[in-house]
Image (cartoon, grey):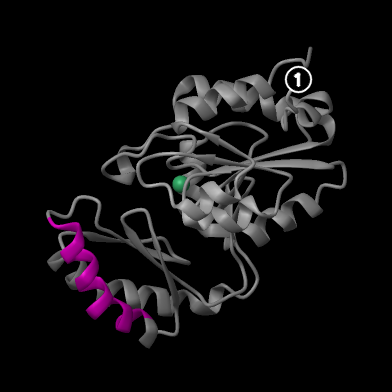
Amino acid sequence: MAFDPLAPLRADPGAGAVLLDVDGTLAPIAPHPDRSAVPATTLATLARLARRYALVACVSGRAARDAGRLVPVDGVVVIGNHGLELLAGGEARWASGVERWLPAVRAAADALGPIALEAGGWVEDKGATLTVHVREAPDPDRARALLEERGLPVIAAQGLAWRWGRMALEARPPLDIDKGSAVRALVASRPAVARSLYAGDDLTDLDALRAVDVGVAVRSDETPPELLAAATLVVEGPAALADLLAGLAVDSA
Ligand SMILES: [Mg+2]
């Protein structure tokens, strides 16, 4: 019988961590992030997982409060802004070193507004980071070219780092914090955790996928090949991931 990489997790949930991206992983991709939702059955599964496993966490690119709104499940830890922000007791807290970069992010968001508009996109100011969304742009290639030519210099002028996401350009403080470091710190803070799983769909999930024992890539038409290559398992979209999670929430045979 083939080795099931999920078996060790299922066999000892008290020593297991389940860490999950939100958009494109738990929630199907929507044309606008305001319209994203995690299906009710998936939320019910997360609640069951949170009661069984040593750690269940969502690690999102959204602001922590926004990610928490999408995953309103007791016992699920919420990390936002790719690791720069933690939601604790309903309050969002910046990771160390983030606060002094907030004015630069705000300035870049303001300056990028008109450029994003011209590209057919819009800027989401998430406090510690910003995202220029071009999913709804009439000509995505032109939008990307415009952002490369005029958007990147604006970001660089504020001393911020940047990367491309799914139909989006993200800018952030040049700090050594990403989803991978966030996952490592969270797991290290829970001594009971011996095995960990992370599931994600985007390039920003690659660091986290490499920080765990079982990396799950959630495939779509836009999944970066690097993520598929780094994954222990590949599932076809959020619905298939929900099935995998439901399987983790039941007693092992
Ligand atoms: Mg995602």
Taking depth in this image into account, of 146 and 109 the one nearest to the observer is 146
- Badge 1 crowding class, 10 Å Cα cut-off, few under 14, some 14 to 19, many 20 or more, is few
Give the percent coordinates (x, y) of residue 124.
33, 59
Residue 113 visible to the viewer: no
Residue at the (62%, 50%) spot, across then down: 209
Quarter of the rendering occupied by the N terminus: top right
Q: Main secondary structure of the magenta part?
A: helix
User: Does residue 145 belong to the magenta stretch?
Assistant: yes
Q: Is mark 1 within 8 Å of ligand 1?
A: no
Q: Is residue 54 left or right of residue 92?
A: right
Outermost residue toward the right in this view = 191
Residue at the (19%, 50%) spot, across then down: 136
Q: Is residue 141 left or right of residue 230?
A: left
The amino acid pointed to by label 1 is: Met
Outermost residue toward the front in this view = 1
- Please determine whether, in this image, residue 90 is positioned above or below residue 121: above
- Give the magenta range: 139-155
Residue 38 visible to the viewer: yes
Query: Secondary structure under badge 1?
Result: loop
Residue 180 lies in quadrant: bottom right
User: Does residue 144 belong to the magenta stretch?
Assistant: yes
Residue under label 1, please give it.
1
Residue at the (80%, 54%) spot, across then down: 188
Taking depth in this image into account, of 71 and 175 the one nearest to the observer is 175
